[in-house]
Image: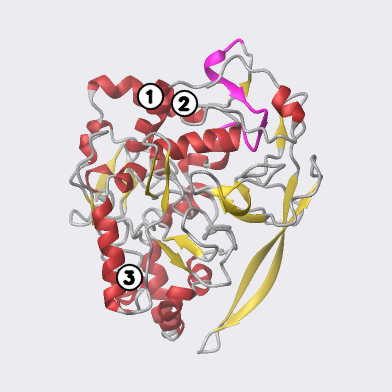
């Protein structure tokens, strides 16, 4: 039995530490929040602590008597990072029709590309709908979900109830959306393990894409190409549901601006489309509202978050499910092992053998999951392979089991059954397994 801080770990496999030396044995509700303190240099202690504070901070409207936490708005979705990422975990969609979105958002765009190859913003509302506004500035409107039910009958006669979200817009403050507007629902993703994923060499990711094509199994992942603001060049995308952000630092800066309206050196201009005159007229003390030091502290905190260790790795059902997971083709995209390369931003992340169960590529997942909204070179049918590490603790930590980009799947079984496109063969093989074997695959996934 292994222990850490009084928390009992159910598994202590030394040969498969999910995050290499950045693995935590905690199995309680704080597992996603564990900092790998023994990898934090003395000179970095205060920066990591400050970064954690900013992630947990509830931001306020500028100007404020506490200027270091000012900058909220003029429009926003939520006032803190952990509002959407509770315990550094995963958001969920509303379950009841008419319920507001508390940890998900709606991306918006119109056809075509902006000047750096990204999606063109919807003219009146920008690249996402912000429901709230600071005093004197109206919120942009409301997005609400209606669940459409449908059933899937498996070859052995088992019937699985599925659901699909239908989004509608209400109380739009600046008129209807553009006739060509495209929208995409997105739940908030987990925050741990991101530094390790950033440290995987680009050549290794591209090699996986080449290998998939050589195998000829219909799986052909693509590395998304997106704009790196700091480098002022197009680079490989790694983060976000369509791999539309290149680095943890830029992902944080984009979320600060898009979700909370907080400007940074990467995105120094408030998110106020021309039609939003009250937003434009809103005065702030200064822009950017956060400096590079604060952004670096938040990124360092993310880098130092540990990945939860697996559990029940020696259970017969888990071992059998892991074998089937590979045999039916799931591991073509959900790669069990990657190795990090040199990482000057934090050398401790280099040379780590990790087990994230992702290839960091985007794949055509079929029409059922398509949002019709391109992002970078990722098409409206393509999604990044989401890492699976730590998902087995989702119910304990975030008190739900919803999966996929819009949370439609209420557990691993439903998520698998939505796979199509490049994943059609793997899904079909899964459907044709006996019920006991399907349950073994689910047991394996819950061990991650």
Q: As rendered, which of 189 and 307 lies closer to the eye?
A: 189
The picture places residue 347, in percent across and down from the top left corner, at: 21, 35
Mark nearer the N terminus (3 vs 1):
1
The picture places residue 52, in percent across and down from the top left corner, at: 42, 29
Q: Is residue 372 above or below residue 50?
A: below
Q: Under tag 2, what secondary structure?
A: loop
Question: Residue at the bottom extreme?
Answer: 156
Q: Which residues are magenta?
A: 65-80
Q: What residue is disc 2 on?
A: 265
The picture places residue 27, in percent across and down from the top left corner, at: 37, 48
- How many marks do you count on the picture? 3
Q: Under tag 3, what secondary structure?
A: helix
Q: What residue is disc 1 on?
A: 49
- Distance between the Cα atoms at labels 2 and 3? 39 Å
The picture places residue 210, in percent across and down from the top left corner, at: 28, 67
Question: Residue at the front extreme?
Answer: 115
Q: Is residue 72 magenta?
A: yes
Mark nearer the N terminus (2 vs 3):
2
- Distance between the Cα atoms at labels 1 and 2? 21 Å
Q: What residue is disc 3 on?
A: 332
Is residue 316 something one can see in this rendering? no
């Amino acid at each position: 039995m292994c222990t850490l801080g009084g928390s009992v770990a159910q598994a202590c496999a030394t040969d498969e530490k999910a995050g290499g030396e950045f693995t935590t044995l905690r199995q309680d509700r704080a597992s996603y929040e564990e900092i790998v303190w023994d990898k934090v240099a003395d000179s970095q202690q205060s920066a990591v602590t400050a970064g954690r504070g900013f992630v947990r901070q509830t931001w306020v409207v500028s100007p404020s008597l506490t200027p270091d936490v000012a900058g909220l708005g003029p429009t926003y979705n939520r006032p803190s990072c952990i509002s959407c990422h509770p315990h550094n975990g995963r958001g969920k969609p509303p379950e009841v029709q008419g319920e507001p979105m508390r940890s998900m958002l709606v991306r918006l765009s119109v056809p075509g590309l902006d000047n750096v190859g990204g999606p063109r913003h919807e003219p009146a509302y920008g690249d996402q709908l912000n429901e709230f506004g600071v005093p004197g500035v109206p919120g942009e409107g409301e997005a609400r979900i209606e669940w459409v039910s449908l059933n899937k009958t498996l070859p052995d006669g088992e019937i699985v109830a599925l659901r699909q979200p239908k989004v509608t817009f209400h109380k739009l403050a600046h008129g209807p959306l553009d006739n060509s507007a495209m929208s995409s629902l997105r739940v908030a993703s987990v925050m741990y393990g991101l530094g390790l994923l950033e440290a995987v060499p680009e050549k290794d990711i591209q090699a996986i894409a080449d290998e998939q094509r050589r195998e000829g199994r219909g799986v052909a992942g693509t590395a998304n190409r997106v704009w790196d603001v700091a480098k002022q060049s197009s680079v490989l995308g790694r983060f976000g549901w369509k791999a539309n952000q290149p680095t943890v630092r830029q992902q944080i800066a984009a979320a600060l601006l898009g979700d909370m309206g907080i400007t940074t050196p990467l995105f120094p201009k408030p998110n106020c489309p021309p039609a939003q005159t009250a937003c434009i007229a809103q005065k702030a003390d200064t822009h950017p509202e956060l400096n590079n030091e604060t952004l670096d502290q938040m990124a360092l905190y993310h880098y130092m978050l540990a990945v939860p260790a697996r559990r029940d790795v020696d259970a017969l059902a888990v071992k059998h499910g892991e074998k089937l997971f590979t045999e039916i083709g799931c591991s073509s995209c959900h790669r069990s092992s990657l190795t990090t390369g040199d990482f000057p931003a934090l050398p401790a992340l280099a040379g780590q053998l990790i087990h994230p169960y992702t290839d960091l590529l985007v794949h055509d997942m079929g029409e059922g999951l398509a949002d019709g909204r391109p992002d970078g070179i990722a098409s409206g049918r393509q999604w990044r392979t989401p890492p699976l590490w730590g998902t087995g603790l989702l119910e304990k930590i975030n008190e739900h089991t919803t999966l996929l980009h819009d949370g439609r799947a209420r557990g691993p079984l439903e998520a698998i059954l939505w796979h199509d496109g490049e994943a059609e063969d793997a899904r079909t093989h899964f459907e044709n397994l006996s019920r006991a074997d399907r349950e073994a695959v689910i047991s394996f996934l819950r061990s991650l």
